[in-house]
Amino acid sequence: MSERSDELKRLAEIAADMKLPADIRKKAIEQLGVISTHDALLALLDIAANESLMTKERDLALKQAREVIKKTSPQ
């Protein structure tokens, strides 16, 4: 469990690190979407709320969050 938490923290840090290239931040956001847990959803929403990120990245985080909600919601 702690290992997953560490992975989420690292991905969220990468996604918010403006010193890294945009494509690496994008891949981190996409990986959070693949994880599809409640904690990943919260991390994606935090990224979407981060005003220092580019609008494209914030939109991607919202799209990924939406997909996590769809995957985890009962049909």
Image (spheres, grey):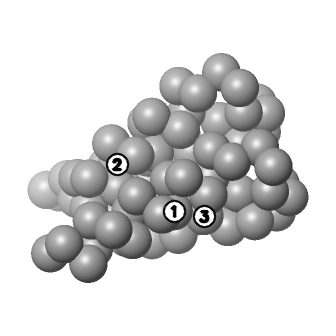
Q: Amino acid at mark 3?
A: Ala
Tell me which label, 2 or 1, sits earlier in the chain.
1
Q: Which mark is residue 41?
A: 2
Q: Quadrant of the N terminus?
A: bottom left
Q: Residue at x 71, y 57 (%)?
A: 25
Q: Residue 44's x, y, as percent?
A: 46, 45
Q: Examine the rendering and report whether any part of residue 73 can be seen.
A: yes
Residue drawn 23% across the image and 53% down it: 38
State the residue position of label 1: 11
Q: Are marks 3 and 1 in contact (CB under 8 Å)?
A: yes
Mark 2–mark 1 Cα distance, whole angstroms, equals 12 Å
Q: Which residue is mark 3?
A: 28
Is the residue 19 above or below the residue 4 in the image? above
Residue 20, image x and y in percent?
80, 57
**Badge 2 vs badge 3, beta-carbon distance below 8 Å:** no
Disc 2 to disc 3, how far (Cα)?
13 Å
Q: Is residue 59 visible?
A: no
Q: Which mark is residue 2?
A: none
Image quadrant holding the C terminus, namely: bottom left
Amino acid type assigned to the residue bearing label 2 in the image:
Leu
